[in-house]
Amino acid sequence: MILKRIQTVVILWAAASACLLAATRYVSHSGSNAFPYTTWETAANTIEAANLATLPGDTMLIDTGSFYLSAPVYTQPKITMRGKGMDSTRVLGSEAPELLHSVMFLPEDSNLIEDLHFVGSGSHYAFIKSATDPDRSLFFTSCRFSDFASSTLACGNNRHVAVINCIFETWNDFALFLTDRGDYVIENNTFYMPDAINEFANFIGNTGSIVLHKNVFVGGGWTGIQGGSGRIDVRNNLFYRNRWLELVQITAASDVVFAQNSFFLTHNDFGRANDILVLYLDELDTCLIYNNVFAGYQPRLVFNASVTNDPMIKITYNCFYAVAPFGQEEHIWVPNNQRLDSLHSNVFADPMFVDPWNGDLRLQKGSPCIDAGAPWILDVDGTRSDIGAFGGPDGEFYIYQDLPPKAPASMMAWRDSNRVILSWERNSESDFLHYVLFRTTEPGAPLDSQHVLTYLDPLGRPIRTDNHKEPLGFDDDGKYFDPERYIPMYAVKDLRRVYYVDWYPIDTLPSYYTLVAVDSSGLVSAASTVQVSPPQAVGHPVSSGVGNPFPTPDSCCQEGIHDSASLEPNYPNPFNATTALVYNLPSIGAQPAPVHIEVFNILGQRVKTLVDTRQLPGRHTIYWDGTNEQGELLSSGVYFCRLEVSGIEFVKSGKMILMK
């Protein structure tokens, strides 16, 4: 509706201009400066000169090349200022540093600006209108704005402002500063600030309608888009590589539609959740949030208002995914433990973007977001809507690429006296099937069946018979536990990582462990490889990939520090009051390492956590008084203690006998 009204204004204004026999004024470096500049041969050689001859309803046509301004330009009402294309015609602030000015243009009502590249060259604003000036309508299309010390467009109190098919790059505050009254349409633009914390748009105090459709926002930060107290419609936008405290902050809006957008946050500079949408909605009538992908570092929606059981707040058919550990319940924050009862049909999974780290947020074949959007909305191909910016009637038709899984990331290995421990980041693709682990003694050896060590399921558990000790069973989260018989196995504390233990490593030559991921289509990822030294280098951790969390080789072999974790027999044993447990921590992983010691009964039920903190390598002592988590004295019987270091289960104690 808003866009249609703007188009109607443009048509009526154009018709009125034609009735006034409007003229075209030309600007060209090759003109002869013959007033009134109505042909290319008599064109003005500066924009200022042509503007002085321009009457309401005229068109100013600017030739190719660069044109510098020496002073702010006050335009006439109902004029068109047109270039030969944003890549051909440039309008710049003064080329003389001593003549720099803060404003390039002060527009009158119903100005249409198109096909130009505005370069600030030290200017604060390309176009500015004071809020105290009469209401105006302004239209910008197919323009480019670069290098402004403040904002490109700063206009307060308007009837209509449309910004369509434009590019914004390099500004200092907001690219758009459109405050107070006005209906605004921001459509199909690109805002590009990848390496700076700058803000996209400010609509503070706006009481009209704000429409943001099919824009691309790259970079930016702090509060990217803020304001608005009327109707806000945000759809089919792409947000990529953003770093912010609050990306979209909406204050006191009456109606909010936030739909079919895709987000991928590649930064976590502030050490906290990234608030994508922050809503202050005390006067809210409706709030519909659906078909969005919120992905990246800890994306979160925040409601800073009373929302309990509000039937008009619906958060449905969205996809939430955090590339760093983040609980499902943390993606939506509501104050005072209030509840939102309209949360349903959301997906908590990797959306499987084609290349998110480089900005390609289309969906791959097999994505859980395909045909998973609101069922009452159809894509352009007639199927049920996809979740994300490319879905819905305003989305795009494209062929889903069937890409191989990602190579297992951050693969690491550590060797102690009788085993090799491998670890890597778990693949998150919904069509991921299994891993294939190879072991060779030569770098670059063929990855064939002869060198297959084992096949592993997504949790890293063997799925074929091999030469490893078979686990007796797993509990609900995939961790192995056997209270009767000690078979050292891995324990996955961070479900983002996989741990695997090779109990029969080759001990005479260096070993090369290579891992690939396979999906349900049979596509194989690139390989991740790590080298492990023979036993004479016991205790030497190695890794492949970026960011080695293990210490340097010599740090494991300091005097008094064991090369493997150990748990000494408790003393006294049996005991009837208190028993001491002495344990030794190796230099494994980032230091201080996370240490977890738990006590279990004969049925394998955890009864108490004795240690849950980070500790440095060395010898430590902890005491247990025979009580449970609630401080209640346990009954006589046999108990066991389990020691984990850096998420790896290293050892279980022998029987600890409690006697009353």
Image (tube, rainbow, N blue to C red):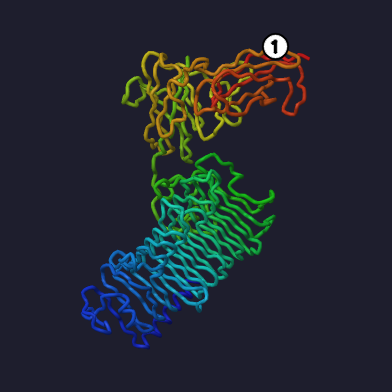
Q: Is residue 98 left or right of residue 329?
A: left
| Residue in front for this viewpoint, 361 or 430 | 361
Mark 1 is on which residue type? Pro
SS of the residue under disc 1: loop
Left or right of 319, for residue 631: right
Figure check: 59 above or below 535: below
Q: Position of residue 443 (x, y in %)?
A: 32, 24
- Measured as percent of width and height from the top left, residue 522 is found at 40, 36
Residue under label 1, please give it.
572
Percent x, y of residue 192: 40, 56
View extreme (front): residue = 98
Taking the image as shown, residue 306 lies to the left or right of residue 357, namely right
Number of residues whose C-alpha sits closer than 10 Å to that of mark 1, classed few (under 14), some (14–19) or many (20 or more)? some
39 to 542, vertically: above or below: below
Q: Is residue 367 visible?
A: no
The residue shown at (54%, 27%) is 593
Q: Residue at x 48, y 53 (%)?
A: 221
Residue lying at the far bottom of the rendered structure = 20
Left or right: residue 261 compared with residue 407: right
Name which quarter of the figure residue 577 lies in: top right
The picture quadrant where one finds residue 146 is bottom left
Q: Which residue appears at 44% of the width and 60% of the height?
A: 215
State whether residue 531 appears in this view: yes
The front one of 656 and 400 is 656
Number of marks: 1
